Amino acid sequence: MTAVELPSVSTVDVVGIGFGPANLAVAIAIEESDAPITMAFHERQAGFGWHTGMLIEGATMQVSFLKDLATMRNPNSRYTFLTYLHAHGRMPAFINSKMLYPYRIEFHDYLRWAAAQLDTHVSYGSTVVGIRPVQGVDGHVDLLEIVTEGADGGRRVQRARNVVLGTGIAPNLPPGVTSSARIRHSSELLTRDFGTPRHGRYLVVGAGQSAAECADYLHRTYSDAAVHTVFTRYGYSVSDDSPFTNSIFDPAAVDDFYRAPEQTKETLLAYHANTNYSVVDLDLSQDLFRRVYLEEVQGRPRLHVHRASRVRACTETVDGVEVEVESLVTGEVTRLVVDGVVYATGHRPTDPLPLLGDLADECKKDEAGGLYVDRDYRVRTSEMLRCGIYLHGAGTESSHGLGAGLLSNTAVRAGEIARSILGQSA
């Protein structure tokens, strides 16, 4: 590792990379610790936003409002969802609604409300382009150099004793598919317009919750258009949110998962993937099925299901998208010209290794080549690195379980990271 010569720059105890719900919860946990800890967060977006492209009117959360940024860690926090409701004068109405799963647009507003209270610690429009070691005279690294690039293209440097990586997830598109004017990932559903409809047809690829929500949205929004759904399954599979199964997201389950043998971890992930991956809420699945059935009864089908099928070709033209849908059962190919294609094909964890640069060589790796993360979400490093590098989110699913990248355990996880940082800073 080569020592880096740096100008005099500000130093903080904690720098968070990314400011989505995960690092927002960390900021709250640190603030509520009342410890004299300085912190700064860098977010590449111009302002706070969480899955803004899927804030569909009427869509609800898939987790309880009690699994907010703080309640599971500290029910007395001023950052709970209930405190937000009280501040906005909506608590009686929310109680009367009997909702356990709030509307997604309301929960997003809650997150934005919480983030606004921590604005002094956040630099928006600030992209972290590199993390470098600051090597001391004894050869150890106690500080890290965080290099950021602003919207103006200017670069700035900040030093930190601890770094928390919360870079989130990235949209996943099939090989050969690129986002364009009429072809996009589901995360861009509401943030970009398809333009003037010319063919009265849209197509959605995927079998999960986002795919079903996109099909529902397009079918309701374009009331005269046909919506074609394509997935390799025979039908939408329903998510398992039964009480016993949901305990896989409990804080105690993280301890069980972390200390389990690797084979057991793989088995548990496979057993319970249907709690989150490529599955749909029962109510939405039933609603879409009934819509298909009613349209058949009326003789005016608009919602078309291409089951056990795949998109064989997808080519954008001047006025639309030419699509070939192949049945995996018969091999028959259906050719369509549509106004837009939405790929609801999931997300992938953002790889933190490129960001770490030379530091990656000092970080321990697991069998799959990913970062080895201790129970407190601290990356295990060589003895040369005495600063803390923390990773949370989907990148820790293989070590900490299914709840690692979801909201379910966010508050508790943030508290564990905060306590670990406080222990290192003590």
Image (tube, rainbow, N blue to C red):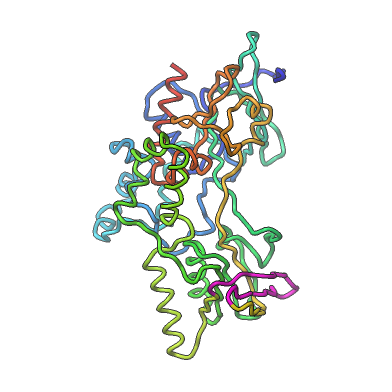
Magenta segment main secondary structure: strand
Q: Going 30% across and 58% down the picture, which residue do you hit?
A: 99
Indicate whether 40 appears above or below 407: above
* Residue situated furthest top in the rendering: 138
Q: Going 33% across and 38% down the picture, which residue do you hit?
A: 252
Query: Measured from the top left, where is residue 237 in percent x and y?
Result: 44, 65
Quarter of the image with the C terminus is top left
Q: Going 47% across and 71% down the picture, which residue do you hit?
A: 235
Quarter of the image with the N terminus is top right
Viewer-proximal residue among 61 and 150? 61
Viewer-proximal residue among 215 and 74? 215
Q: Which residues are magenta?
A: 307-329
Indicate whether 359 appears above or below 74: above
Indicate whether 204 appears above or below 5: below
Q: How many marks?
A: 0
Q: Going 40% across and 52% down the picture, which residue do you hit?
A: 107
Could you tell whether 257 is left or right of 304 in the image?
Answer: left
> Residue 182's quadrant in the figure?
bottom right
Q: Would residue 300 be counted in the magenta stretch?
A: no
Could you tell whether 246 is left or right of 223 in the image?
Answer: left
> Residue 193's quadrant in the figure?
bottom right
Q: Would residue 317 be counted in the magenta stretch?
A: yes
Query: Measured from the top left, where is residue 216 in percent x and y?
Result: 48, 71
Query: Measured from the top left, where is residue 379 in percent x and y?
Result: 53, 29
Indicate whether 324 appears above or below 11: below
